[in-house]
Amino acid sequence: MQKYPNIKIKTIPTDANEGETIDKQENFVWLLNLPRTAKQILYEPFLDEDKFDFHTLFTGKNVLCINKENPLSDKKNIHLKTALQYPLIYHGMMTINKDALNNTLLSVIINHYGDYDINIAAQTNSYGIWLDLIASGKGIGITYDKILNHMKEMYPKQWSKISVISTKEYMGMTTEYAVRKSGTTKIENVFIDYLVNNCTW
């Protein structure tokens, strides 16, 4: 915006299945987080690969956050089946119900490895509350490894009571941008160039 002051950026938070609607915007770059296994990105059926080109910005993996007094806390990695015997403290923007849960990125990656019944103990949009609940032993959490250092800095009191454990199943996440296969506009190219050169970990 400093370099191109006449360009106005409008962000539209949306579920991936609304891509058809937001695609109608004049200048359009779609930012997505997608689940992935060790071998492949798990594209959902509503992501039309015939209509959009997808480009990876960076990848990471999901890890478990567990209270240090939990019997699992001294393990380096565990199976999902073991972890999900404990209640899950879910961090996310949507209100959790059974149908909504089945459509979350977390559910997609977990159920790739088995048909799990996920027991949601609590749901919050706040990382502070999320960490409070985990630190107090109310359940386990699953989060993106890219933000761990940020949480350690922001919430040192809660973090001192939490262990981070990997799962034996690879629960990855990839952050991508998508553009129309029909071509990109000059403004879209400016924004894409910024993403590629600045949005890295």
Image (spheres, rainbow, N blue to C red):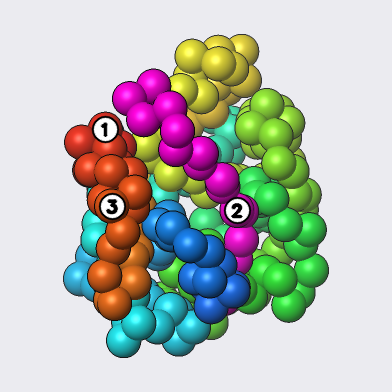
Residue type at numbered disc 2? Ile
Magenta stretch encompasses residue 51: no
Q: Which mark is residue 186?
A: 3
For the residue pair 86 and 88, the one nearer the viewer reads as 88
Q: Nearer the viewer, residue 184 or 72?
A: 184
- The mark lying in front, picked from 3 and 2, is 3
Q: What amino acid type should be assigned to the residue bearing mark 3?
A: Lys
Q: Quick check: 136 left or right of 83?
A: right
Circle 1 residues within 10 Å: few <14, some 14–19, many ≥20: few
Residue 7 within the segment the image draws in magenta: yes
Instruction: Say which element carries label 3.
Output: helix
Which residue position holds label 1?
198
Q: Is residue 201 left or right of residue 141?
A: left
Residue at horizontal 61%, vertical 13%? Answer: 157
Where residue 68 sits, quadrant-wise, is top right
Q: Which quadrant of the structure image shows residue 71? A: top right
Label at residue 12: 2
Instruction: Look at 51% across and 39% down and name the residue there.
Output: 8
User: Marks 1 and 2, Cα distance to the nearest angstrom?
Assistant: 20 Å
The magenta stretch is 1-17
Secondary structure of the residue carrying tag 1 is helix
Position of 145 relative to 158 (above/below):
below
Is label 1 or label 3 in front? 3
Query: Up-down: is 186 above or below 99?
Result: above
Q: Quadrant of the N terminus?
A: top left
